[in-house]
Amino acid sequence: MSTERHYLEVSGLRVEVVRKAIKNLHLGVYPPSGRVRVAVPMLIDDEVVRLAVISKLGWIRRKQKTLAEQPRQSQREMVTGESHYFQGRRYRLRVIEHNSPPRVALKGKALALYVRPGADTTRREVILNEWARRELKILLPELIAKWESIIGVQVAEWGIKKMKTRWGTCNVTARRIWLNLELAKKPPQCLEYILVHEMIHLLERHHNDRFKDFMNSFMPQWRLYKAELNRAPLGHEAWMR
């Protein structure tokens, strides 16, 4: 499927323009930086895009202001006392050095990180990320099976990886879904929302009215979950669809 992509400068804004086989123009402002993206049908020219952006300038500026004010976590140093998030809850990190294989455990409001003496910041972060990945891999099979039955699709393959620009992706042809590792930090309903979003792409490739109708039908409260995901603290290297 053909897609064309380029950028326009409109009233001081850098606007990404994506032309593809859709029927209507879609304008969006995306975290963390408030980037502006306009998806348009193949035959719509740049002047129409420019006018659409100008007509929405007030809304765009308000969205960018909201994103700029959204709380962000500071750079992680992986030391005792630092705040970390898991499944939407805030925990205090407790680093414990010991001469045994590394592990992570939740203890009340503490996130205990057991590491070998001398483990540096990078190694500590790797251990924590791998634990979060394993936790997601425990949760996801049941969720996928649940929504395969509800939506009526089959996911051939799925995985978890770090992504800087998306919460999830779906390769429709391969029926393969990738979810962002960062979702381990977010409330469970946000993880489920992103999973359903990507699975519905197996019914409708584009973010058009048909896609939204499917979302409304299968997960009527999806906008609430999306808003909750937007409100959650962004990581130091933040991203979002």
Image (cartoon, grey):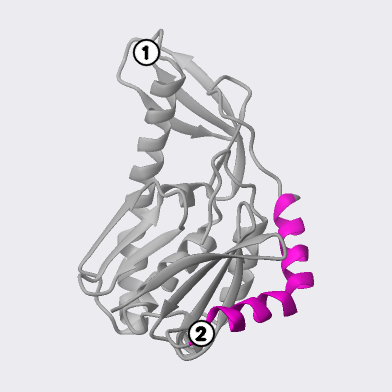
- Give the residue type that dot 1 points to: Arg
Left of 228 or right of it: where is 192? left
State the separation of the CA atoms marked 1 and 2. 49 Å
Image x and y of residue 49, in percent: 59, 79
Q: Quadrant of residue 196?
A: bottom left
In the structure shown, which secondary structural element does the residue marked by tag 2 occupy? helix
- Give the residue type that dot 2 points to: Lys
Identify the disc placed on residue 195.
Answer: none
- Work out whether residue 101 or residue 236 is closer to the camera in this orientation and state it: 236
Q: Quadrant of residue 21?
A: bottom left
At 36% from the left and 44% from the top, the residue drawn is 133
Q: Is residue 168 magenta?
A: no
For the image, the number of numbered tags is 2
Q: Earlier in the sequence, mark 1 or mark 2?
A: 1
- Work out whether residue 8 or residue 36 is closer to the camera in this orientation and state it: 8
- Magenta segment: 44-68
Q: Provide the major secondary structure of the magenta segment.
A: helix
**Of discs 1 and 2, which sits in the foreground?**
2
At 24% from the left and 71% from the top, the residue drawn is 175
Q: Dividing the image into 4 quarters, which one contains the N terminus?
A: bottom left
- Work out whether residue 125 or residue 30 is closer to the camera in this orientation and state it: 30
In the structure shown, which secondary structural element does the residue marked by tag 1 occupy? loop
Image x and y of residue 22, in percent: 43, 87
Q: How many residues crowd around disc 2 within 10 Å: few (fewer than 14), some, or many (20 or more)?
A: some
Q: Is residue 59 magenta?
A: yes
Name the residue that disc number 1 marks. Answer: 116
Q: Are marks 1 and 2 in contact (CB under 8 Å)?
A: no
Image x and y of residue 110, in percent: 58, 31
Name the residue that disc number 2 marks. Answer: 212
Image x and y of residue 232, in percent: 64, 52
Q: How many residues crowd around disc 1 within 10 Å: few (fewer than 14), some, or many (20 or more)?
A: some
At 53% from the left and 85% from the top, the residue drawn is 216
